């Protein structure tokens, strides 16, 4: 049995959670409360970087969400969440990497700034939604006709952005894609409630303040 260490508010952990559910892989869930559980010796023995998610498979430990998703895809190839054509593989990887490197960093002001803040408005304009819409094109999913790991990574990010007030009106294909994702049972099961989103915002704000304080003291 797989053991999955996660917190449902964590976007990175939700990537793995959705992958497990989409592949219908049985697992033993262990919720880590991110107010101190991650620093307990038992968890640090599993992940010395005190991050979630972590997956343990018969003593084999995997950290970092993308690595875990790749492991699950390789070990449990049915249903496939990676396409086989080179261009479609590249699109899936682009969806994952652009989300991680370009999309999420620009979301911090959406979480931390007030709605009428110029920084928040600028961050919203800077989100690479046009690129993601172009990447999706007229396909049902980022990798073509079927759900992929790219949809899971980018879908969670864009879903979160929408819950933070970012409109998708200018990108009809992304809107339709989001509805398509939310029609799937695993996405309904893991959807964040309004209170979940607020808890996520509070946690991110605290982390940002702590990092700013540490930077001033260094």
Image (spheres, helix red, strand yellow):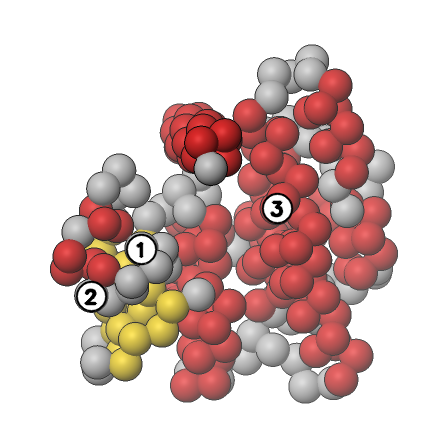
Note whether residue 186 is visible: no
Q: Based on the displayed image, in which of its 4 quarters is residue 118 positioned? A: top right
Identify whether 89 is placed above or below 184: below
Q: Earlier in the sequence, mark 3 or mark 1?
A: 1
> In front here: 60 or 161?
60
**Spatial distance from mark 2 to mark 1, Cα to Cα?**
9 Å
Q: Are marks 2 and 1 in contact (CB under 8 Å)?
A: no
**Residue 133 located left or right of residue 210:** right
Residue depicted at 61% across the width and 46% down the height: 104
Note whether residue 128 is visible: yes
**Residue 143 located left or right of residue 182:** right
> In front here: 158 or 68?
68
- Label 2 sits on a secondary structure element that is loop
| Residue 122 at x, y percent in the picture | 77, 28
In front of the other: label 3 or label 1? 1
Q: Earlier in the sequence, mark 3 or mark 2?
A: 2
Disc number at residue 45? 2
| Residue 81 at x, y percent in the picture | 56, 74
- Label 1 sits on a secondary structure element that is loop
**Spatial distance from mark 3 to mark 2, Cα to Cα?**
28 Å
Which corner quadrant holds the N terminus?
Answer: bottom left
Report crowding for label 1: few under 14, some 14 to 19, many 20 or more residues within 10 A (C-alpha): some
Q: Based on the displayed image, in which of its 4 quarters is residue 89 positioned? A: bottom right
Residue depicted at 47% across the width and 85% down the height: 74
- Label 3 sits on a secondary structure element that is helix
Q: What residue is disc 1 on?
A: 50
Disc number at residue 104? 3
**Residue 5 located left or right of residue 16:** left
């Amino acid at each position: 049995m797989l053991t999955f260490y996660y917190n449902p508010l964590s976007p990175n952990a939700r990537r793995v959670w959705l992958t497990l559910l989409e592949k219908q892989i049985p697992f033993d869930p262990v919720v880590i409360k991110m107010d101190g559980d991650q620093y307990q010796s038992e968890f640090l023995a599993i992940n010395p970087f005190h991050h979630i998610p972590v997956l343990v498979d018969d003593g084999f430990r995997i950290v970092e969400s993308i690595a875990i998703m790749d492991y699950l895809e390789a070990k449990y190839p049915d249903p496939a969440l990676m396409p086989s054509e080179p261009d479609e593989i590249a699109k899936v990887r682009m969806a994952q990497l652009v989300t991680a490197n370009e999309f999420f960093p620009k979301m911090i002001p959406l979480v931390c700034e007030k709605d009428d803040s110029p920084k928040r408005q600028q961050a919203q304009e800077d989100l690479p939604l046009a690129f993601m819409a172009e990447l999706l094109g007229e396909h049902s999913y980022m990798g073509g006709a079927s759900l992929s790991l790219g949809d899971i990574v980018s879908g969670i990010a864009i879903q979160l952005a929408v819950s933070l007030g970012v409109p998708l009106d200018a990108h009809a294909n992304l809107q339709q894609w989001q509805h398509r994702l939310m029609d799937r049972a695993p996405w309904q099961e893991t959807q964040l409630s309004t209170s979940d989103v607020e808890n996520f915002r509070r946690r991110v704000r605290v982390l940002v303040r702590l990092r700013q304080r540490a930077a001033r003291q260094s």
